[in-house]
Amino acid sequence: MTFELFDKLLLLSRGKATYNGRVADVREYFASLGYEMPLYTNPAEYIIQLVNTDFSTDDKPKELLADLHASWTQSAHAVAITAEIKHYKTYTTTLATAFTHDTANPYLLPFTLMHRSFIKSYRDLVAYGIRIAMYMGRT
């Protein structure tokens, strides 16, 4: 099955995470919340039906989704991921402030832009060749 070929899954609904982790652990996670997947059911379809409230007409699925959001936020795995992200943000912010300036060097800016333009031209020689041929054919 294609779903099980993925390593990790970030499941979002209404802009909030309901699961983030290994695909192999998704059955166990939802089972621990009381949402046991029936045998011989496609896990991807089951999870999508569980978290998708777009087509619901009553409030029961929305309450279920709020419960899933709260359960994920309070889970040990979510707390660990949040701490890791905060650590990473702190590290990169510290590293970035050590090497950045408030503004770009105005003398190097034209050279940087020309260098970027040459790289772009070099990577797309065919397009520039066609343009040159078109302009030469016009005259």
Image (cartoon, rainbow, N blue to C red):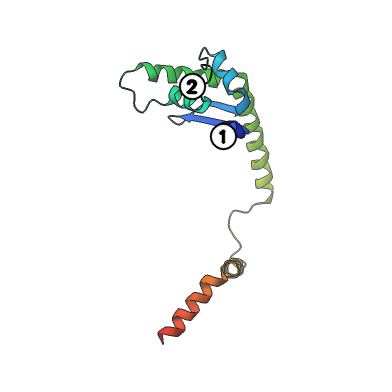
Callout 2 secondary element: helix
The one of 78 and 61 positioned closer to us in this rendering: 61
Q: Residue at the spot x=42%, y=29% of the render?
A: 14
What separation in Å lies between label 2 and label 1 (alpha carbons)?
26 Å
**Which numbered dot is residue 57?**
none
Mark 2 or mark 1: which comes first in sequence?
Answer: 1
| Spot occupied by residue 96 in the image (x, y as percentages of width and height) | 65, 47
Tell me which residue sits at (63%, 33%) in the image: 7
Residue 63 seen: yes
- For the point 64% across and 25% down, which residue is it? 80
Front: mark 2 or 1: 1
Given residues 128 and 91, the one toward you in this image is 128
Q: Which residue is mark 2?
A: 69
Where residue 54 appears, as percent x and y from the top left, is 36, 28
Disc 1 marks which amino acid?
Thr
Question: Where residue 31 appears, x then y in whole percent?
Answer: 55, 15
For this orientation, the residue located farthest to the left is 57
Q: Kindly identify which residue carries mark 1.
A: 2
User: In what quadrant of the picture does the N terminus appear?
Assistant: top right
The quarter holding residue 8 reads top right
Q: Please count the marks in the image.
A: 2
Of the 4 image quadrants, the one containing the C terminus is bottom left
Q: Is 119 left or right of 42, judged from the image as shown?
A: right
Instruction: Check the image and report above or below for 135 versus 46.
Output: below
* Residue 22 visible at all: no
